[in-house]
Amino acid sequence: MLAKIISAANIGLDANLVTCEIDISSQGLPSFTIVGLGDRAVEESKERVRAAFRNSGAEFPLHRITVNLAPADMPKEGPAYDLPIALGLLLASGQVISNPEKLDLENTLIAGELSLDGSLRKINGVLPLAILAKTRGIKRMIVPKDNGVEAAIIEGLEVLAPESLQQLVRILLGQESLEFVERPVINLEDGLSYEYDFSQIKGQESAKRALEISAAGGHNILLKGPPGAGKTMLARSFPSILPPLTFEEAIEVTKIYSIAGLLDSNNSLVTTRPFRSPHHSASYVGLLGGGNNIRPGEISLAHRGVLFLDEVAEFPRQSVESLRQPLEDRRITISRASGSISLPAQFVLFAARNPCPCGFLGDKKRNCACMPGQIAKYKRRISGPFLDRIDIYLEVPPVEVEKLSADLEVESSAEIRKKVTAARKIQLDRFKGPPAGRAGKILTNSEMGNKDIKEHCTLTQEGLDLLKMAVSSLNLSARGYHRVLKLSRTIADLATSENIQAEHIAEALQYRAREES
Ligand SMILES: Nc1ncnc2c1ncn2[C@@H]1O[C@H](COP(=O)(O)OP(=O)(O)O)[C@@H](O)[C@H]1O
Ligand SMILES: [Mg+2]
């Protein structure tokens, strides 16, 4: 007897269909073989399926069993084939039947891990599977209970999410009624809770303005200042002024969290922009991603959100340098034995650092206790090419005591967020058309290439004059020149100005990296 079950394999962020063919033959000695380029977890599936059968009152066929996971040349990983194999065995041995009227298993994508007692365990990467099912016109999915809501995010897909093999069998035998998982209510404005609101930050007006520009145009930012200036606080308040995720962005981000296994069953859609703050002891793989069963790194978990590198000079130089390529490409390619995969990594880099190891270099009130050699070494941690990828560079002074105690009316995050969202809207409209000579879609000014800059950064005559003067007097490099243009485009957008004016250029120039002294 032969049964066929549709399942799927995650490859990077996308999924491919896998057909599980299960053949039971009464010829020859009892055996159980799985072929089709499975890894250890797939091989061990045999033991889980056997035990799950025994413990759920099903009869394990004592015959010659062959399972083929097709296509045979595509590697299959993980325990998600347990359920399709188990169901295929039940079908092939006649213990359940596919009922086209109630539940035809032919038009159903099935994935799930089995416990020895027959209960179904949550698996990673269900959202990409659901997207695949939808695009391939598959009507329904059967997944573990804890993955149900995640699959049901995709509209128009029937999702059955039993808690165990026993329950699924009862449903298929008509002994228990089946109920599809309800599609969750998706509210991308909801769940916005922040550590700090901008209104709690006293003084630091220019830093707040810089954050506003960074949020509006997606510009990478570096704050430098003494300990206690509020750098960490500013960074942690940054998500509160970012525009809400669009549904497409939320799906993109959720896919990454899904394959990373970071979704919990009552929080199946990522609805807020990620804010990741890896420690400086984070490993290379932890930052960039990789490993045998591909784990997205911090840079991919920060996709469409913020990667915060606090005390960036404490990070090993190699870690900081390794970010250069993904900052440029906005993706990361991870190679491994079974082929390379590419994960998105489009984030705003938010870096903070002290001026020197003790933190008081250049302080008017306190003396720096560092040796010159120490200071030089500290600075070398951050290379020029890395700084080149930072659009906004700002020195943050210590917060003034009078301002800390003063009860001033300051703008709340909600107000700034409104301005940021309006500026993003201008950018979305601007980049709606096909981008100049590149594949990926542009959402923000920071992503403009030189061609886009030429097309979209029109200056007034005064603006042009000022920029020319800056190029010669400030010795701006070509990169620096383009950076100023992109930044002034965002500043002009915040001011809803069609053309870039001299004042926008002037402000953008303030944020260039000064000669490190
Ligand atoms: N501008 C500010 N307004 C209100 N509180 C501040 C401000 N700057 C610093 N603080 C307070 O000082 C603490 C230390 O700030 P922090 O962000 O850790 O400084 P840094 O990271 O620059 O060393 C914060 O938790 C906050 O309570
Ligand atoms: Mg800090």
Image: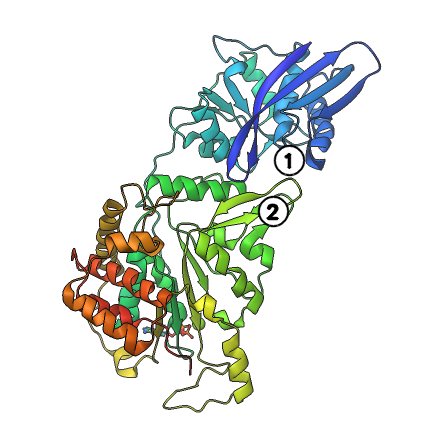
Residue 263, visible in the rendered structure: no
Q: Position of residue 501 (x, y in %)?
A: 17, 64
Question: Which quarter of the frame holds ligand 1?
Answer: bottom left
Q: Answer above or below: position of 378 versus 503.
A: below
Amino acid type at image mark 1: Glu
Mark 1, residue position: 77
Rendered residue at 51%/19% (across/down)? 108
Q: Position of residue 195 (x, y in %)?
A: 37, 60
Amino acid type at image mark 2: Ser
Q: Answer above or below: position of 225 versus 121.
A: below
Q: CA distance from mark 2 to mark 1?
A: 16 Å
Label 2 secondary element: loop
Rendered residue at 21%/68% (across/down)? 410
Which comes before the other along the chain, label 2 or label 1? 1
Mark 2, residue position: 335
Label 1 secondary element: loop
Rendered residue at 50%/89% (across/down)? 369
Q: Answer above or below: position of 351 versus 250.
A: below
For this view, does 72 lie left or right of residue 135? right
